[in-house]
Amino acid sequence: MKYSVKIHPPGQVVDVPMGRTVLSAALDAGMDVPHSCQSGNCGACKARLVAGDFEMMPYSEYALTEEERQAGLILTCRAMVWGDGEVAFEVQAQAAPPPREMTARIQAIRELTHDIREVVLDCGEGGGADFLPGQYARLTFADLPARDFSMASQPGERLLRFFIRRVPGGRLSNHLFDGGASPGQVVHIAGPYGSACLRPGSAMPLLLAAGGSGLAPVWSILHAALAENPDRRIALYFGVRGERDLFMAGELRELAARYANLSCVIAFSDERGKAGQGDIRHGMLHEVIGRDHDDLRGWKAFLCGPPVMVDACRAVVRAKGVAAEECHADAFYTDAEKQQRQGAEA
């Protein structure tokens, strides 16, 4: 059984099978609506319930507060349809490049840590992909299932860079880490996707928090922000377990030395090691951020990495004054975690 749901903007009616979510139906219909994690963790797909009967699957309380729900807001990625209805997104999706498909070739695969690789794709003479810093692409290697990865490069560059973490038992991980992938092989790219991205024109100070491979979108956002306004105040926090998990530290320190208003802090959650020396602290990322900042009113935040880290950092920056609409989250769920969270969907 299908139900009709009218979605504003653009005021289009879509057919949604019973038990499916509003967002999944909208995306299947090719609609450009605000979204990012699709797992109830970021709040990007928040919309007002105008009419209809919806059931919400589990979601993070930071993505949708009880006050917001009582006020009639829903997360369209968690709202399953049980009748005809109507929803209106609170904020229209700002201009972003429409998703498209293209092919590229692997130029290089570089070891960053024991479980993270940098994969560089060459888009060819036609030029690079068009996207906003912080967005992600859907990559298909060989005949393997497509997977989502955030760009670490800048829009329009011929070379697309990705920081890809090994997932134990993952088919793509085995392909990339165990020699199945090599330079010259073709990769299919679809995108860009995601609304947790930096749009030009804002002068607000930035707090950037990255955990592990979550440094990829933060790296893209950081360079775009510095290129637009070298004097913009930026506080970057990079959290890893310990020394063996640390990468791009030299590059971060070079940037911090070059730009007076940029600070870069590295947090070791498990290993004390060099913690306490220079820019390396010991503690969970949200703890370090909380100790460094008393008042973040007027700041914009981008939080990227493991879901637990993103939730904890979001709670801290919101408590310190970052407005809900200025807090952007990109939680990195594995495919297995996504399937588990979406398991209630028909």
Image: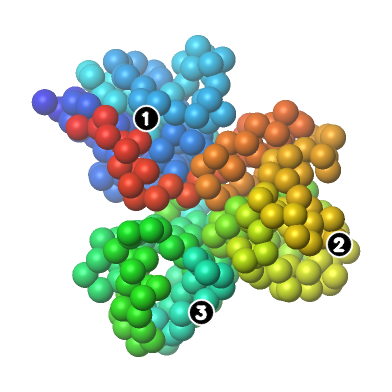
CA distance separating discs 2 and 1: 43 Å
User: Which image quadrant: the N terminus?
Assistant: top left
- Name which residue lies at 53% across and 25% down: 61
- Name which residue lies at 51% across and 38% down: 42
**Which label is found at residue 110?**
3
Identity of the amino acid at label 3?
Arg
**Which label is found at residue 278?**
2
CA distance separating discs 2 and 3: 27 Å
- The vertical placement of 192 against 159, above or below, is above
On screen, residue 322 versus residue 108, left or right, reads right
Mark nearer the N terminus (2 vs 1) = 1
Point out residue 107 in the picture as x, y percentages from the top left corner.
44, 85
- The vertical placement of 150 against 317, above or below, is below
Please, which residue is most extreme toward the top here? 70
For the question of whether residue 288 can be seen, the reply is yes
**Image mark count:** 3
Please, which residue is most extreme toward the right here? 260
- Name which residue lies at 56% across and 29% down: 62
User: Which image quadrant: the C terminus?
Assistant: top left
- Residues at marks 3 and 1 touching, judged by CB atoms closer than 8 Å: no
Q: Quadrant of residue 342?
A: top left
Where is mark 1, residue-wise? 78
Viewer-nearest of labels 3 and 1?
Answer: 3
Point out residue 2 in the picture as x, y percentages from the top left corner.
15, 27
Which residue occupies the foreground of this view, 105 or 200?
Answer: 105
- The vertical placement of 112 against 308, above or below, is below
Identity of the amino acid at label 2?
Gly
Which residue occupies the foreground of this view, 144 or 170?
Answer: 170
Mark nearer the N terminus (2 vs 3) = 3
CA distance separating discs 3 and 1: 37 Å
Which residue occupies the foreground of this view, 21 or 288?
Answer: 288
